[in-house]
Every structure is written in structure tokens, then in C-alpha cells.
Amino acid sequence: MTINAVKREIPDYIEGYGKVRHYQGAFARKPEGAIAGAKLRCFNNDVTDKRVSSIKEAIKASGLKSGMTVSFHHHLRNGDYVVNMVLDACAEMGIKELTLFPTALFGVHKKVIDHIKSGVVTKIMGSVNGPIGQLVSEGGMQVPVVLRSHGGRPRAVMAGDVHIDVAFIAAPTADKYGNICGTLGKSACGSLGYAFTDADYADKVVAVTDNLVDFPASPVSIPQTKADIVVEVPSIGDPAGIVSGTTKVTRDPLRLLISRYASQLIEASPYFKDGISFQTGAGGIPLAVTAFMKEAMLKKGIKGGFGLGGITGYFVELLKEGLVGKLMDVQSFDLDAVRSIGENPNHIEISADWYANPWNCGAAVNMLDVVILGATEVDTDFNANVNTEADGALLHGTGGHQDTAAGAKLTIIAQPLLRGRIPCVTDSVYNVTTPGEVIDAIVTEYGVTINPRRKDLLDAVSGVKDLPLVPMEELAAHAKKMSGPTDPVRTTDRIIGVVEWRDGTVIDVVRQLKK
Amino acid sequence: MTINAVKREIPDYIEGYGKVRHYQGAFARKPEGAIAGAKLRCFNNDVTDKRVSSIKEAIKASGLKSGMTVSFHHHLRNGDYVVNMVLDACAEMGIKELTLFPTALFGVHKKVIDHIKSGVVTKIMGSVNGPIGQLVSEGGMQVPVVLRSHGGRPRAVMAGDVHIDVAFIAAPTADKYGNICGTLGKSACGSLGYAFTDADYADKVVAVTDNLVDFPASPVSIPQTKADIVVEVPSIGDPAGIVSGTTKVTRDPLRLLISRYASQLIEASPYFKDGISFQTGAGGIPLAVTAFMKEAMLKKGIKGGFGLGGITGYFVELLKEGLVGKLMDVQSFDLDAVRSIGENPNHIEISADWYANPWNCGAAVNMLDVVILGATEVDTDFNANVNTEADGALLHGTGGHQDTAAGAKLTIIAQPLLRGRIPCVTDSVYNVTTPGEVIDAIVTEYGVTINPRRKDLLDAVSGVKDLPLVPMEELAAHAKKMSGPTDPVRTTDRIIGVVEWRDGTVIDVVRQLKK
């Protein structure tokens, strides 16, 4: 056991995970050695068509065998058919003991539970949202799930921590030679950012498409040089689940108040000037913050630099209006974003590596001024938990939380002080996803709580009209008072989840729930 | 000594090159192992500006030391300032014994000769066009130059045959964080295709730009994740040397006749149908072939699939007119091409790896129907030489010759039977660049000579009106008669050039000229 830099006691070895590198600080670990390459392949002109006739044929051609690691990307979100399609076929073909390495799993993938129970899937490295997370939390898997951030995942692959045997890429458009495009086709999802690493570093890459076009497809997100096999299927996903119609700004007065405080904080910060860059995501509060910021930008004649991350129609509007110069898009959330990335050269498709990996020549998050994030809970050390719920169930992925927090000059957690009767500010979070070291402010309906490490920021916002500053102690006391006594999370000793910091060290572990 | 598959006697070990893998056939060698990765790097938000103040500072920051390998790309062609700028600075800094790994060198780089003489540059792997080639041919370097094709070069890097310590990338546009774009700026050159491999696999990457723009630059050819250092200079090149004004179709009646024969051959081939793809390059004959093909396509109502390779305004015209659907561009030859690739989403920037590497999941050349090439000489085995002149001097790079010949379904060498009094068809070429195995037809002013391996093609074109078919024996005899007796190449035993086949085997060697 070792106590790490966020005061968590972590075993030095975790069964089913391996030797633990302990978290030593947000920027402590530096890489050694070289990027781990995929297998060299050789294609000559005897193959001018990489298509096979079915998912099973693709699996056969890929050489996928029991015990291997398969990867998927989640741009089709809750509309994705590909994960189920592939795992069902594996099950029928008698392939077992797979390690699943998705960028995220959704409700639509609850069938994975059957494959876990039957031994087709025995390990998961990736976000386990919803029902699969519940299963895992209750001890339904033999080895711990490994959670990595959007940047930590490509880092792990490039550093050789994870080797992808076969990557299955849901391709909204592809040609017979494997050029893949995300912006066209009936299942268009826009950016294919998360899939780039898989295409670059997997030993075999299978493009699964429902929109085969003449060679060469264009625009190209992932080129033919990366794809070994192409398979056409009737449908890779349900458009209704792939993109949301329109993302909406919150109308809840309490959340609007929080959003206004967050916006005021940004406006008072030294970053609110021409060229300001920000990531706000798709939640109700962040969108409202963006709306307030837009007002302020118009009022003060400020133009933004770039918007980053998962991109919504709201950001597209800012781009069109010239209020941000560029969009850097790793995931297009709605139809407006999908359309824009296909048409507007200032709307740039970026990979997860480009977005967030700490181990390359510089991710986009490093250039970020402001990010608005949420959390299921934060604590008096400003540590944030986004992975587990109040009962300790591991229901959420890390996403870009760690990466943007570590990269942005101003990291704001904006959320109500309580959800139902559960306090969002506690003495100590059950699980640390992101260390307080990289979180600058908590914004709740009670005002703004600044991390004492950021004295500069505290000075900047002191005395701003109508912006209450609340010390952390007061905030925590308030939360405690409001919620009344809460039950501690009740777990067994068994570790069912390992939460990696983006540099590959273990920042925390999650344990099996007590029945 | 071993006699290889094109009957060349090659030593098993070459001083300054190493152990020889002998050429065994165009498609014989298969890769083993994994792609060799660059050093892992780590950039956090303490660096949001990668600029240094001068080329020397960039060299210092890159860690470049005597004995290392530096790479350059040649999209600025005969207008490039970057190679000289970097080598001059290295010389002043006392850095010696560098291995130069350019994609090609031009007349503008003749200053490299001084750096060779002073020991700054002691080895060259890459094309040595013109004066440097002359120097090398006369024994001016201690170790042999290694020639690789456009596809063989990225193959060599990915397979670990060549490790790039520092890559210098001439960047027509860049931002302070290293996003690089080729289509904008006063030194715009269009595609940056050859530079991609260097950016991907060098341990350090330096972007040298004369057009710094706000972060993030877009469109992005090479992303910030690859660039360690950015340096701004007054000018990276002379626009007059970077792009030619307009490439011109030949007006010489003899060459027009050859072009017409080549076009007739294509029209009579099974490939002349909807979707036909072709590469014709920028020479006078190939452009004329394209012009004749265009006529034929219009007459027969045929639409082409894609045009490949170095792209000219002529191809851009075909794209605009809908006679080809897409352009795949590794190098933009003229202003029209530069403009088009910046604007038209159907004009696709491709890397050299994508263009031509035999060791990935399939290069563009594999999808090619027809390629028109030249050669300094071909022989009765249909072997082609593009590297040496009649006197044996090593004056030309391999370019995409090997790759397109190996990839295309119909590879045509089109050229006059004699240049001056020098025959272009001989009993045995002095140097084999591309084996007869992958060359299908020689087209001269005497008609079309089909490789007997291609009986299908011979059948297809037999009886075509006004298209004389000339057996190889007749063609060679004719050439001999026309030229009269020729002097054999006079060389010493010393090997000054190693010509690799695209798969990394040695297909031939070039020896030092006798004085």
C-alpha cells in the first residue's frame, strides 16, 4: 500500500490490473522510450477491394481470437449498433475472454452484460456508463475496469500500456479501400476524433460502414493506409441516438443563477479578452454559461479564439457569428455540428490525441483558457469525482474532465450544491477523478469558491458586483447543513475499478458495493 | 556477391550502407515486426508557445548533434531556402557528420556541396539531383548515397531502417503551437505530403515558417501534436522556384506522336472505362497524353475516377470539368494546383505513405489504372533506369517511378527512342531503377512495344487502327542502328550509390565514374 499525492491508500499491485504506478501530482510523470507501433502490413495491387461479406467474415479475416483486445469508438453514442454487432458475432463464433477497449459504452450496449456473463468479455478498459457500470459495481466482473480520460487513452496506447489487436471503426462513410469519413451518410456523426488512435495503433483495423461510396471517399478522416478490412452492413446506428436534435440551454432558475455566476467569474478573470478560448460541453449549465458569455462578449466587443471539445450547434452559431474564430471538434454532438464540420474549414476535426493527450507535442487542452465542468461531488481539497454516484456505483466515464482541467488556465466546476438531498460538496470525495491541484473554482448557487492556490484569481474577482465569494469551509458547512447526515458509501475491499490519471498513474480505486 | 532477380551482381555488404538485402522480385519481400515509433514527448500547459527566436536556437533546442540524421521535404522545390538555412547554421555551430535525409535536393541546394566538403554532411539518403549528384558520381562522398522511391522512403522510416533525429519542416503557414498548413501564405506550396512521415516519426520536429498566424491555424496538414519547435524566419523560399506558372503540353511533333500512341494504347486497353484513374505527372509528353485522353473521354462519354501524384493545373481543369472525380495530391506543381487543394474538398492532400508506401494497409498507387512515366533508358528486359544519365552519372531521384509502376494496372514508359544521339532502348540498362516485371509498355515514335508478360494487353491492342505494334527486338535494333556504336559507361569498382527497390532490398548499385 502506498498513499498517493491525493492522500489515497492504493495497493502497489492490483489483481487483474498489474503493478500500480502511484499518482504523484498532475504533471509529475514524464514519458520514457518510444511510441509503440502497430504491426507493419503489406498491401500490393493484388488487393484493390478490402471488402468482406459480413461481420463474421471481417472478424475471421482480422485474426481476432479469444484473449485479444478489441477497440471501439463512441461517436455513434446511444445510437451505436457496431459494438453489439461485433460482440454478438464473436459470441456465435465461440470467441471468448475478450478485453473490451471502447472509448465509452452507453445504455444501448447493455447487451454487453450478457457477453460478460457468458465469458465473451472478461475485461473492460473504458467508460462503463449506466447498466454495465452497475453490474461492475456489484462485482459482476472478475477483473477491475480501467478508467482513462480522453487524453489518457491515446497516451496508454502510444506508450504501449494497451495494445489493440483489432479496432472496429464505425464508419458513416467509407470506400472499398478503407478511406473513412464521418460527416457524410445516413449515420453521419461528424468528427471521428476518438477513433484516430485506434486506426493508428491497432494491429488490424476493420471499417464497418452503411454508406459505401466510390473510391476515393472524401473528405477523409481516416485514410486507407490504416484500414485492413471493410465490411458493409445495413446500418451502423440509429440516427436518433447518434445525434441529438438541438442541445438546450437550461431554463431552471437555480441553474441559470449558477451559470450567471460562472460567467461573471470568467468575465472578471484575466482571460476574458480577445482570443479567449473555451470548452463548455453540452450540459444545460455550460450552455447557459456560454449564452451569458456571448452577451458579455458582444457588450465588450471581445472575439474568442477557439471553442474546443464536444461541439454543439451553440458553438457553431458562435463560429458563424465570428465570436469564436475556430472550432476544434473531437465529437460533434448535434446535427448542426455535424453539418458544420463537413462544410466549414474553420471547424476542425481533431483526434483524441490532439485534443487531450499529455504525451505528445502538445494537446489542444493546453491552449485552453477556460473550461466549465461538472462533477458528482467535490471536496474541501477541491478534488472532483465524476466516476461514481453518491452510493459509490461506478456509472460514469472520465471523459475529458482530467485533461481539460489540467490544461485550462481557468477550470470551473459549476453545479448546484445539492442534487436532490445529496450534497455535491463533501469533506472528502469517495473517488478522486481529478485532483484539486488543477481545479480553480467551484461555482454553486451560493456563489463562487476559489481554490486558495489561485490567489491571483481571488484578487481578480474580489469586489465584483453581485458575485458572492464563498470560502470552501463555508460552502462545505452549508452543504452539510442542507443535506443533513448522509450515509457513507458501503463497500467491500474488492477493487472493481481503477481510475487512472491521464499520465497512466493510478489516482484512485473504486470498490465493490456491499449488498 | 549475389546475383539478384534483375541479374545484377551485388555485394552482400556495402561499406557505408551495411548488409544488403537482395532484390528478389517486385512483390517478394514482406514486412515483419512493428512500426518504429518516435520518442514519446510530454507537453503540458506550461508551454503554450513553441517559438524560438532563430534557426540556431531551434537547432539548439532540438538537441541536434554531430552524427545525427536530419530530414527535409522538397515541396518548395527549387525555391527552397530551408535546407541551406539549417545546414549553414549547423556549420557555424560546429555540427558535423550529419546524415542528410531529404525527400529530394535541387539545384538551389548546390551549397550542400560546400557542407559535404567541409564535413558537415557526410552521408545523404535521398535524391541527389544535378550538381550534388555529379559530385557524388565523381567520388566526392565517403559513403554511398541511398536512393529510395517516394513510397520506399516512408517504408524505410516506419520499418526502422532510417531513424530521423530532427525533421525540419518548411511550413508555408504555422501557428505558435506548431499547426502547419501548406496552402496559405506567401510561400504556399499546396500539399505537404512528403513531410508527413518526417513529422510522424522524427524524434524532434521543427516547423520553419514565414507566415505565422493565430492559433489554431487551419486547415491543418500537420497538427501541433507532432511539432516540438516553431521558428519564424523572413522567408522560407522563393515563390518563383516553389511553383511553376503553368505547366505546358509539348508542341514538338515527335513528342505529340508519342503522346498520341500512348493515348491510343490506353483507349484500347481494358482500363479505358468509367472510373479510370491515372497519374501523368508534369512532363510535356504525359500532359499531352492527358490532353489526348481528355478528347477521347469526352468523345466516348467516359468519366475518370481520380488523378494521382504530383498535381498540375491541367488535372485541376479535369476535376473542375468533372472528367475526374477526385485528385489525390502528394505535391502540387503549380499555382492552380495550390489554389485548388486549398479550396476544393475533392482535391485531397495525401502523404507519401498514402501515395506509395508498400508497407501499410494500401497505398493509392495500388488503385491506379494507368501511369505514364519516363526513363533515361529501358532495356530489352523492360527494365527502366531513371537515376543515371548515359555517362553513368547519378543525377536523378527515383521519385514515384517504382511505386506507380508496381501499383498501376498499366504502366507505360513514353519517350523518344533517342535523346540527341543517345539511344533510350539498350540491351541492358546501366542501372535498374524499376524492374521490367512491372513495366507493361514502351511507347516511342515507332509505336507501342508491349511486354510479352502482358499477352492480355497485346491481344487488346492488336489491330487498333494507326497504332503500330513494335516487338522489343525490333525496337532495340532500330535504336542501335539510329545511334550507331555507343561508349559503355566507364566506372571504377567503388560504389557511390545504392538504389533500393521500394521494399528496402537493393535492386542495383551505381559506381564512381572513371576520370
Image (cartoon, coloured by chain):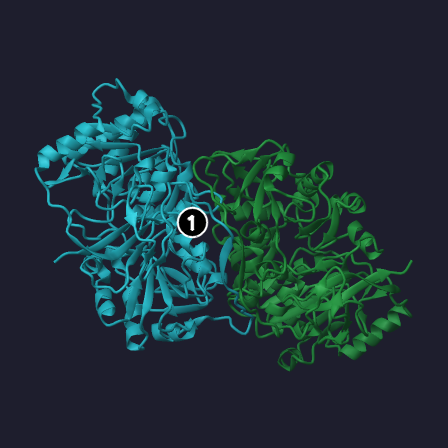
Chain colours: A green, B cyan
Judged from this view, the residue extending furthest toward the left is: B484
Mark 1: amino acid: Asp
Count neighbours of disc 1 (C-alpha within 10 A) and say few if under 14, some if 14 to 19, many if 20 or more.
many
Tell me the quadrant of the picture where the C terminus of chain B can be found.
bottom left
Q: Compared with residue B159, is residue A14 higher up or lower down, i.e. above or below? A: below
What residue is at 79 percent from the left and 46 percent from the top?
A113
- In this picture, residue A20 sits left or right of residue B218: right
Q: Nearer the viewer, residue B114 or A323?
A: B114
What residue is at 65 percent from the left and 69 percent from the top?
A411
Q: Compared with residue B474, is residue B51 higher up or lower down, i.e. above or below? A: below
Q: Nearer the viewer, residue A115 or B427?
A: B427
- In this picture, residue B422 sits left or right of residue A290: left
* Any part of residue B261 in sight: yes
Host chain of mark 1: B
- In this picture, residue A8 sits left or right of residue A484: left
Q: Position of residue A192 (x, y in %)?
A: 57, 49
Q: Position of residue B30 (x, y in %)?
A: 46, 45
Q: Nearer the viewer, residue B512 or B42?
A: B512
* Any part of residue B253 in sight: no
Q: Position of residue A127 (x, y in %)?
A: 71, 55
Q: Compared with residue A308, is residue A481 higher up or lower down, i.e. above or below? A: below
Q: Secondary structure at mark 1?
A: helix
Where is mark 1, residue-wise? Answer: B353
Q: Nearer the viewer, residue A102 or A414?
A: A102
Q: Which quadrant holds residue B433?
A: top left
Q: Position of residue A183 (x, y in %)?
A: 55, 43
Q: Which quadrant holds residue A387?
A: bottom right
